[in-house]
Image: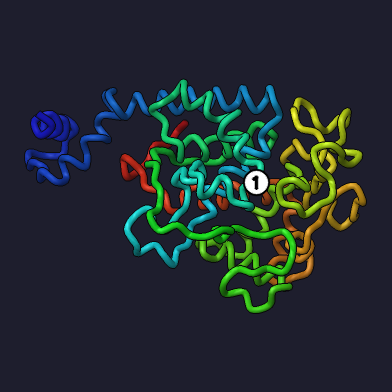
Amino acid sequence: LKGVFLDRAFRQAGFGAARLSPTRMAGCFDCFCGLFGGAGAEKKKALAKAKGLVKAVVLEKSCGPILIRTAWHDAGTYDKANASKPWPEAGGAIGSIRTEHEIKAPPNAGLQKAITAYLSPIKEQVPEVSWADLIQLAGAVSVECMGGPVIPMKYGRVDGEPKELVPPPFGLPAALPPFGQPGVKNPNDAAEHLRYVFYKYGMDDKDIVALSGAHTIGRAFAERSGAVKEGYMDGTLYTKKGAEALKNSQTCGGRSWTKDWLIFNNSYFTDMPKADPECITFPTDSVLMTDPGFKPHFDLFAKDQSAFFSAYASAHKKLSECGSKFEPASGITGI
């Protein structure tokens, strides 16, 4: 039936009388399902519904930062050195952050709330959407909802769990030295650490600076990273209970990188040199202002927000697809 259907469709489209091989016929069938209805169209409809639900919860609860961090930490387990291994052994944006091995590890402290409180109720309403897709969709939508760029995302990710469990910190970046990742020669060199982490995603220095700019939103907590003294019960002028910058956030406290930490803009770059005592600047932040490979991009993004948004959207998309397996293979776009 598939062969007859597609052969007729190709003839009507003017592709001649030659029939496709069975292998190529099967590979194209999902594409035609998306054009004429069926499974492809239903998945696209479910993704659009999920996007609307995520927007609603982000606006209602001002929870965009934790959703972005969750998406990053799911994708950030990827290592291109393992790309030749059977999928999903290289890690990446495969939804595995939900597993006990990852979600309860120190680098992901505090992220359980994103899964259980914010995303699980949405997943129940759109079971057709994979966890891997929902996590990445939530990150991209959060950026947009907070004023950042629209990211040209691709969906259709398949959920996966590596059989070979990598120990924490899963190749994720750290805030403070010593930086103990394999391959880092100087445990106090923040630039070397950043390049070690992001180069294994296939990134370059521009991508590193652009992605670092996402620290324009969000906070660090004593109970999570432990890199600041402020926790849930206290905070700074910008994060304590009653602070205007909290908006609808249900969690007070912590220390932010910027004053208006729920607005996605280029203030991370414009304000860092001012050294606001109410904000944090980790060594992995300040090195962007001095390292010869990072500084030109830092300076550009401080001057030109549109250049930052363009670079960020490209780098975010790249990160969101690390290690992902898509069905159909071409992915689903236009959500």
Q: Is residue 78 above or below residue 115?
A: below
Closer to the camera in the image, 213 or 249 = 249
Q: Residue at x 37, y 28 (%)?
A: 43
The answer to which image quadrant residue 155 occupies is top left
Q: What is the secondary structure assignment of the residue under circle 1? A: loop
Closer to the camera in the image, 247 or 30 = 247
Whether residue 57 is visible, yes or no, is yes
Whether residue 302 is visible, yes or no, is no
- In the rendered structure, the answer to whether residue 142 lies left or right of residue 167 reads right
Quarter of the figure that contains the N terminus: top left
The answer to which image quadrant residue 263 occupies is top right
The answer to which image quadrant residue 264 occupies is top right
Amino acid type at image mark 1:
Ala
Looking at the image, what colour scheme do you see? rainbow
- In the rendered structure, the answer to whether residue 44 lies left or right of residue 12 reads right
Q: Is residue 52 above or below residue 251?
A: above
Badge 1 is on which residue? 109
